[in-house]
Image (cartoon, rainbow, N blue to C red):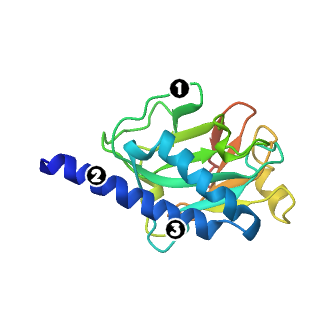
Amino acid sequence: MNSEVLNMTLIRFFAVSVLSVIFASSCSAEDKAGSESLESVFQQYLSPHTIVLNKGKPASVRGDFNGDGFSDVAVVFLPATEIAASDLLHVSRLRRSPEFFSSGKPHRSLAIFHGGKAGWSSGVIQVFVLLDDSGALETPSFELLISRVDGNAYSDLVSGIPVEPAGDLIILPTEAGIDTYLYWNRDRYKLFEPEDIP
């Protein structure tokens, strides 16, 4: 077995092990049974292409991000190879501005798994991968946060977003202290970056 194959095998084993811990710790007691199925969904769609990260800060959060009444999971990961889109796996860039400078190397990115009535093992889970070339998710203070629709601060947070979000917000803090918000826009995730107010 050459060293490259051995390294990829070790990376996959490490990713699956870390993923097991992350999903188990982010689940409530009633969701624990479904976490094994969610782990297999992650392996099915992303495991050969990613490394899951967890360095003391939440690497995953649960919420109803698309507003359909079912629990979804957002996971921070590091792409290891190119991820190809399919009918159930949607791949896009986190930022779409034309002036955006790409470093050309992989940075921490986000995968959002949509839950559904049939559960994680149904085989029809929609997965949205948001690749980030900017390194914004790698800042030392980064922590994946959430604002729920029924939360006190939710209406203040969504007031500047051009479209009313369908579900819970994923909050992506920045080093500058200006949070950016990821929201479901009926068919894809969009990033809202408030203007810098002095």
For image coordinates 58% across by 60% down, the residue present is: 60
Name the secondary structure under disc 2. helix
CB contact under 8 Å: marks 3 and 1: no
Mark 3 belongs to which amino acid? Val
Mark 2 belongs to which amino acid? Thr
Any part of residue 170 in sight: yes
For image coordinates 52% across by 68% down, the residue present is: 21
Quarter of the picture holding the C terminus: bottom right
For image coordinates 12% across by 47% down, the residue present is: 2
For image coordinates 43% across by 69% down, the residue present is: 140
Residue under circle 2?
9
> Observer-nearest residue: 69 or 168?
69
Residue 147 rendering spot, x and y as whole percentages: 74, 60
Nearer to us of marks 3 and 1 is 3
Mark 1 surroundings: few (<14), some (14-19) or many (≥20) residues within 10 A: few
Residue under circle 3?
21
Find the distance from the CA under tag 3 to the CA under tag 1.
27 Å
